Image (cartoon, rainbow, N blue to C red):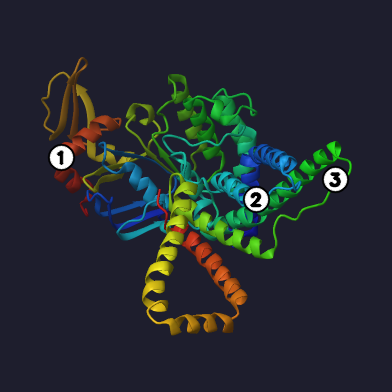
Amino acid sequence: MNTKNIFNLIRRYFIESGRKDINSFILIVLIIAFLSFFSISGRISDSMMVFLTFLMGIIYAGRIFGIFLPAGRAIHYLTIPASTMEKTIANGLLIFVYFNILLIAALLLGNTLGGLAHKLLDPNYHLHFYMPFDLDNLILILVFESVYMFGSIYFKQRTAIKTSLVIIAVFLFFIVLDTTLIGRYFIHSNPENIQIAEETLNNINGELIEYVVSILTFVFFNFMTWLRLRETEA
Amino acid sequence: MKKPKTYINMIQLQNINFSYHKGRTIFDDLNLSLEGGHIYGLFGKNGAGKTTLLKIIAGLRFPKHGSSTTLGQPAALRKAEMLKDLYFPQEEVYVPAISIRNYVKCYAPFYENFDNEQFEEYLHLFEITSMDDKLTALSHGQRKKVIISFALATNTKILLMDEPTNGLDIPSKGIFRKIMTMAANEERLILISTHQVRDLHCLIDAVVILDNGHILLNASADNITDKLCFKITDDTGTDEPILYCEENLRGNLLVTENIHHIETKLDIELLFNAVMLNKERINELFNAKN
């Protein structure tokens, strides 16, 4: 593996998309500032933050992983002299590091700007810096990003929409599985099972399992991205 | 200083079987070896698989069976070592929305032997004067000129070109021939797939003809003119076996077997037609052991 190639791939991204990134960053900061200015608490709600994260994800993921569109781009990308591993790492650094820095910066800056505007109108308003998400949220975002990264390689068109639909379908599948099969045939068939299930859940360290599952999912989808990119034909 | 690797056959395809998902077989036990120091013309009817062949060589398509080795590496692995010595400008070139100058900044660092002076010289010959023009604002022909100039300036050992003269205006086709001659050298293999034989006939020094999943002919121009004769006559009276005859206003265009060892000039269009009509005889003539 050649770090120079990874550097050149990232440099290539910034030369090709840097200006577009700055424009969309400014737009998103202004949207957040506008929303936080008009919110009662002076900062955007958590659900709005999730929505904006998703919106930013679609914009940037499409840009970073829009590898196969328009036609001819796939050949262009696949014949860039860097190995599949180097390309996967460069994309990973862009999405997991660069994009998240942009995301945090946009949320911090937007909220602060909204707060400052609030303070101009109401001098008694207490300006506070708002850290948009904690470690748990960040891990969750990384997992989702790894899924989107895989989706962008797996699907050739409308990657963000198709990946989102698959994620929703998987969630629905588990909800249905949980409320019908498990609920009906396991727990409700015998009331003792409810107690067994509760005891089992109490005995295990839920947080640890969550971390382990998240890390495994992250690694799995990154590995799948590399594998899929290696197998991609144009 | 690191010694550059040398290869007897820069491209080696062995027993290649390839078909698309819909089922039509494109290549059936195809074998092909290509050496450096030549400009090969790759010819075939529409749908013969010329572009697919270029893609297999570049590692962009994976054969179902057989091995494809490019610069000593399995092509399908698309290793960086192979890709840095291979450039594949497509028929419909893709360009990002950046200036020519930035394109060079983006992609030249990937190619160790990229020569900026050469690039600027080729652009100058193609009459592209501003490096600050945005690629997406250029016409199809101009984009192609930039990408061809870039491809040649990378100085990669292998250059695969798919219909390079499509979209170029008449003066540019002449310039294209000129810069191709400038860029060709003993270590470089250039493989050009095209239907525009008239654009390239004076450039090509070896011919590969693809038909029905096989290579019908892979021979140097010298070898071809050694075995075949291309001539214009008023009648078809000749003691040499005629492989192909075409009437036109100048007379009869003939391709015959060169039993009297007459020196004639290769006409790729006539050759192609002769090969298509006499597959078995061509195979005997060119693949005979003695």
Dot in front, 3 or 1: 3
Q: Is residue B264 left or right of residue B186?
A: left
The amino acid at mark 2 is Met
Residue under mark 3: which chain is it in?
Answer: A
Q: CA distance from mark 3 to mark 1?
A: 91 Å
- Look at mark 1 in the image and give the residue it sits on: B278
- Look at mark 3 in the image and give the residue it sits on: A125
The amino acid at mark 3 is Tyr
Q: Residue at x 47, y 57 (%)?
A: A167
Q: Residue at x 50, y 24 (%)?
A: B139
- Res B187 seen here: no
- Look at mark 2 in the image and give the residue it sits on: A49
- The mark found on residue A154 in the picture is none
Q: Secondary structure at mark 3?
A: loop
The spot of residue A36 in percent (x, y) is 72, 43
- Res B233 seen here: yes
The residue nearer to you, when weighing B199 against A184, is A184
Q: CA distance from mark 3 to mark 2?
A: 22 Å
Task: Say whether marks 3 and 2 touch (CB < 8 Å).
Answer: no
Answer with the quarter of the image where residue B155 lies: top right
Dot in front, 3 or 2: 3
Q: Secondary structure at mark 2?
A: helix
Tell me: residue B171, above or below residue B265. Answer: above
The spot of residue A26 in percent (x, y) is 70, 38
